[in-house]
Image: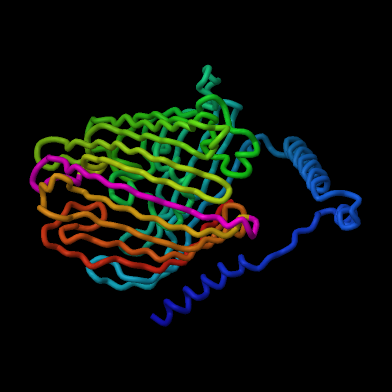
Amino acid sequence: MRQVILLLGFFGAVLLLALVPTRSHCADPLLDVLERKGTLSPEEVKQIEQERQEAEKAQVEALRDEILPKALKGLEIGTLSYFEYSGGREKDDKAFNRFRITRGYIIVKKQLTPWLGFRVTPDVTQDDTGDFKLRLKYLYAEIKPPDLGFLTDMKSEIGMGHNPWLDFEEHVNFYRVQGTMFIERAGIFNSADLGVSVMGYWGGQMDEDFRKRVSKYYAGRWGSWHIGVYNGGGYHAKEENENKIPEVRLTVRPLPDLLPGLQVSYFGLFGKGNKKNVSSWPDYDVNLAMLSYQDSWITFTGQYARTRGNNKGTLVVPGTDRSLKGEGFSFFVEGIPPLLDRAFSVIGRYDRFDPDTEDWVASGKDAYELALGGLAWRFYPHWMALLVYERIFYEKNNGGLGAVPSPGKDLDDDWRVQGAVQMSF
């Protein structure tokens, strides 16, 4: 426990550095002098700096086009990685104290033409022996068709692409570094699958100010949409049946001028699970609704989901093909104080999910509840440090996250204190 306290104290000290104010200076010393003497206003200096940066960017791009080999033009290489230290207790009262790599994307993109691109992304995973291995997360061709009236900014993914829901939610709630989102944590589905999909915006994009100040992701003026057909088992499952899963997300931004951060979303999928338990493939349905709000000082999401079965085909009444009906909700909030250049945040989240609302497996309570709270520091674009306390409360008959209820099991609460770092470029 002493080691846990010392290591978490270190993460806390790193976060507290965000409270030390710093004064920014102009890149050009002459502009700095003119601003201090009052010859130029701060707004004029900012405008000059912005114009200079844009001119430099244009010069770099022109030079790059001249000297880069053709094979490197349009090529982007990046990473998204999560590293954490956590200590606490898992189900069955097992204590832990560990460093972990929980995500290790290598992102390679190639823009071949204005309408045709390609992406491949392997990800790090650790197997049961402790060995780190790379597995494929995304591999798809990206085709951008022309706008079709009110349907704008469209693109299609062909291959192993994004699930319509989780990528969207993770660009509203940016804290995937802490752990999986509500519906994935409940064991219903994951974030990628083999298939074909098309997505886009309703009526063009939000203005530049919103995209810079709040979010550039899924920034359709009247909302966005994503429709696809997939195998259904997820990106690390072999397709076991002939069923294909249609999935759809529809998002509306009802007041783009009055409340631009307000969005209402629906996600649905309908099909069969990927495991035959007795003689047939179990039903697999999801209906999910979310209200979300994003601004420069606060982000909020509230969602409600009704499910039947899961993508693996494992949430069934034991010994049958009857899928369990589930129900749950989740709330997330991020508060960003108007200080420190929006670098410091306070976050909180609460989930509740009942995997068997009809009590087919165990009569009585069998849900779980998750609660977490913490601090975050964005110290560089797309980089952040996080310090969080999380607790999961299991009702008496719950079998664990994503598992069938187990009558009388009575799991002890899970808890952990976590320090995590997101690294991205």
Q: Is residue 276 magenta?
A: no
User: Which colour style is shown?
Assistant: rainbow
| Residue closer to the observer: 36 or 9 | 36
Q: Position of residue 66 (x, y in %)?
A: 76, 36
Q: For the point 88% across and 49% down, which residue is it?
A: 40
Residue 309 to residue 388: above or below? above
Q: Is residue 92 above or below residue 79?
A: below
Q: Residue at x 17, y 43 (%)?
A: 324
Seen from this angle, which residue lies furthest bottom? Answer: 2
| 222 relative to 325, above or below | above
Question: Between 408 and 270, which is closer to the camera in this rendering?
Answer: 408
Residue 422 is situated, as x and y percent measured from the top left of the image, at 52, 57
Quadrant holding the N terminus: bottom left
Instruction: In the rendered view, tell whether residue 375 sits above or below residue 45.
Output: below
Q: Position of residue 396 (x, y in %)?
A: 16, 61
* Residue 358 quadrant: top left
In this rendering, would 179 be left or right of 129? right
